[in-house]
Amino acid sequence: MQTENVILVNEQDQAVGTMEKLEAHRQGLLHRAISVFIFDNDKRLLLQQRALSKYHSAGLWTNTCCSHPVPSEEALAAAHRRLGEEMGLETPLTFAFTFLYRTPFDNGLVEHELDHVFIGHTNKTPLINPEEVADYQWWRFEDLQDEIQSNPQAYTVWFRLIYQKVFALV
């Protein structure tokens, strides 16, 4: 398995170093991340179910794609790269906002990320990478809102924090 490094940042998103991804999550250090939200022409959001092999949040539903830029990679470039690697999609992306969050997991890992959120649009059918994604679904806001209220544990923490804000921008 190839070592993947993340960009450690301060709260102003200034790079302060790099670290191996799993170690950054073990120590709960703040690092840069990306989240991509893809909508179709009917304003439905493309969700992915994280692969069961993921080291945290395995099998949970989340935004279209999420990951980390590698050292010296811009957030937008990482968003395009990971959208292709995870969902087999290519489409223009627009920066929406950043947000900072921290959440511990039962396995001792901690997500502490300054997340760059991007929005894109396509009607193409995803070609998912089974190493990253178990399944996908398109959701309308109202249906998704009801589902998250009924079954919040089925969704990632970061997705629950921001999905309403993203839908408000579309």
Image (spheres, rainbow, N blue to C red):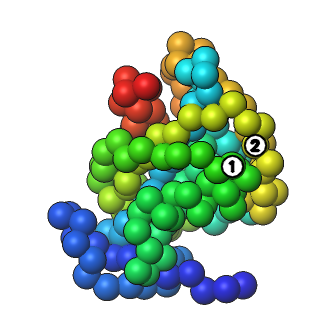
Question: Distance from label 1 to label 2 (Cα)?
Answer: 6 Å
Residue 16 is drawn in which quadrant? Answer: bottom left
Q: What residue is shown at x 60% (from left), y 86% (from top)? A: 3
- The correct choice, above or below, for 108 with respect to 135 in the image is below
Picture layout, residue 43 above or below residue 95:
above
* Residue 147 percent coordinates (x, y): 60, 21
Q: Amino acid at mark 1?
A: Leu
Q: Is residue 130 above or below residue 91?
A: below
Task: Classify residue 163 as left or right of residue 148.
Answer: left
Instruction: Give 166 or 11, whichever is nearer the viewer.
Output: 166
Q: Secondary structure at mark 1?
A: loop
Name the residue rendered at 33%, 59% in the picture: 114
Question: Mark on residue 5?
Answer: none
Q: Nearer the viewer, residue 134 or 166?
A: 166
Mark 1 Cα-neighbour bin, 10 Å: few <14, some 14–19, many ≥20: some
- The amino acid pointed to by label 2 is Pro
Query: Where the C terminus falls, by quadrant?
Result: top left
Name the residue rendered at 44%, 59% in the picture. 76
* Residue at 61% over, 17% down: 42
Which mark is drawn over residue 126?
A: 2
Tags 1 and 2 in contact by the CB under 8 Å rule? yes
The spot of residue 44 in percent (x, y) is 60, 23
- Kindly indicate the quadrant of the structure image that contains residue 111: bottom left
On the image, the x and y values in percent for residue 13 come to 24, 66
Residue 165 located left or right of residue 132: left
Of 37 and 63, nearer the camera is: 37
* Label of residue 89 in the image: 1
Q: Is residue 43 visible?
A: yes
**Residue closest to the far left:** 12
Q: Secondary structure at mark 2?
A: loop
Q: Image quadrant of residue 18?
A: bottom left
